[in-house]
Image (cartoon, rainbow, N blue to C red):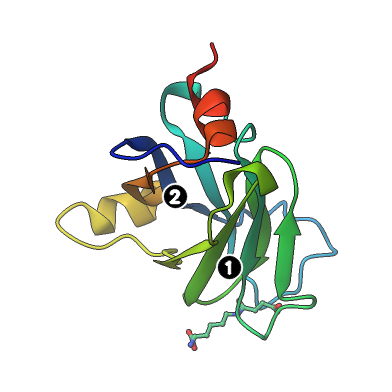
Amino acid sequence: SKRLKNLQICRPFVYGNMAVPLKEDRSPEIPTDHTHSWTVFLKGVNGDDLSSFVKRVVFKLHETYANSTRSIEEPPFEVTETGWGEFEISIRVYFVPEASEKNVVMYHHLKLHPYGPEAEQQKTNGATVTSMQYDEFVFNEPTESLFEILTKK
Ligand code: SLL
């Protein structure tokens, strides 16, 4: 559809991961060398639903994982796994066809281990580690269809 000139629409989002150390009562299905459970995610801010304009999010994990390319077609756009190591995850976002927008990719370093002044205490407590970043989708001269999608209440 037609593009709206001289217009820009932004939608904020956050992406990143949470991780917790596995406990003694871990499931027997979890490999013994795994130390953490983690979730990598992409989501709107303040509970905003991105799925009106995000068609799919593809998380590319380290190749040590089976089926390391994980395609998530509906919210929550996230992948939960267990493992032992940190690595870089690519997060590729595909928009709905009406948007006529190229996909975008972000890179996130999966964080499992606390660091900094609180690290020792956090390790002792088995605290949840979070690493996330704010960003925004910027749509320049959006199609009329995308504009409608993004502005309807
Ligand atoms: C490292 N360069 O050496 C990184 C690689 C890979 C982590 C970390 C695999 C789990 C599984 C897993 O945790 N891979 O599928 O068994 O630290």
Q: Residue at x 79, y 78 (%)?
A: 66
Location of mark 2 (residue): 15
Q: Residue at point 65% right, 62% down?
A: 58
Question: Residue 104, percent across and down?
Answer: 48, 62
Q: Name the residue located 62 percent from the left edge and 64 percent from the top edge.
A: 59
- Seen in the picture, residue 54 relative to 51 is either above or below; the reply is below
Residue 127 visible (yes or no): no
Find numbered disc 1 in the image and state the secondary structure of the residue it sits on: loop
Q: Is residue 109 left or right of residue 41?
A: left
In the shown orientation, is residue 31 left or right of residue 94? Answer: right
Locate the C terminus by quadrant: top right
* Residue 98 x %, y %: 65, 42
**125 or 44, nearer to the observer:** 44
Type of amino acid at the residue the image marks with label 1: Thr
Dot 1 corresponds to which residue?
35
Q: Does residue 52 show up?
A: yes
